[in-house]
Image (cartoon, rainbow, N blue to C red):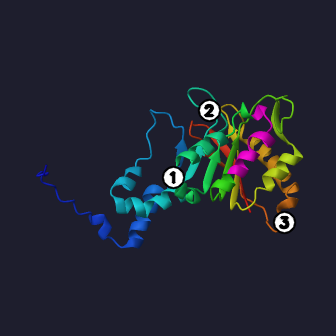
Amino acid sequence: MTDTTSRTPETKCLFLELPQEIRDLIYELALATNPIRFYRPPSETRHGLLPLVLANRQIYAESLELTYSENMFKFYGYTNTGWHFAADAAMSFLDLVPPWTLPWIRHVHLTITEREMLFSLETTIFPRVDALKDKITLQHLSLPFPNALHRFGAPGMAICWYHERTHYAHLFDTLVMKKLCSITNLKGLSIAVHNYEGTDKDEDLEAIGIFRSRMLKNGANLGSHEILVEECRNEPLDDGRDACYAPIRY
């Protein structure tokens, strides 16, 4: 049987007539501004400019690497149906994306939940971070920790947090701190403390100061790397709370 259906000529894409460097700049401005999150609430608006990637095959081919490499991929330690470690969610995501895109993923954000803090980070976070580094070209790792107002007492816990009237401090296990400092081949490591409603931001700054001093004290195994600690800054989290970030650049 002969198909006699008339075909509509493809619409000319004027965007592709722009110089390549102009198109690359537009891709960067349009696609590399907001984080891409794994396990997003269904009711939440998605990245409004991502459909640009699907405009046609040439735009898809030109913009895909930048979309992966310039965005921060955020993974959370919970879902609507249960809970899991954020690093496990990251590994599951990497199993789903095309293998040839893995070298483009460079920026990963793993949110640490209160429940995850009940387990040793030596057995939950660090092995998975090593696995992430083996799988992708990891350049920047962001690890926000919860600001829990009570002290956990689980055996084998790597980090505990306590609150006493007007101030709190962080008690970091020396081995854990050395492990954080030994995450090599990263251009940046960001540590954040969630600032829950009702807590004093000055206390967060004090706690971050303690963290920084312990990070620097236990950074002897960095070899030729030099730790540069930037000023602590307050930034809104996705749920409206603030987080006090202490980026560690080395």
Q: Quadrant of the C terminus?
A: bottom right
Residue at the image point whose x is 40% and y is 47% from the top: 48
What kind of element bears circle 2?
Answer: loop
Q: Earlier along the polypeptide chain: callout 2 or callout 1?
A: 2
Query: Magenta stretch?
Result: 117-131
Image quadrant assignment for residue 135: bottom right
The residue type indicated by label 3 comes to: Gly
The residue type indicated by label 1 comes to: Pro
Residue 236 shows up from this direction: no
Q: Are marks 2 and 1 in contact (CB under 8 Å)?
A: no
Residue at the image point whose x is 39% and y is 67% from the top: 23
Residue 125 is covered by the magenta coloring: yes
- Overall secondary structure of the magenta stretch? helix
* Residue 78's disc number: 2
Instruction: Choose between 137 and 245: the one closer to the eye.
Output: 137
* Cα gap from disc 3 to disc 2, whole angstroms: 36 Å
Asked if residue 12 lies left or right of residue 138, the reply is: left
Q: Earlier along the polypeptide chain: callout 3 or callout 1?
A: 1
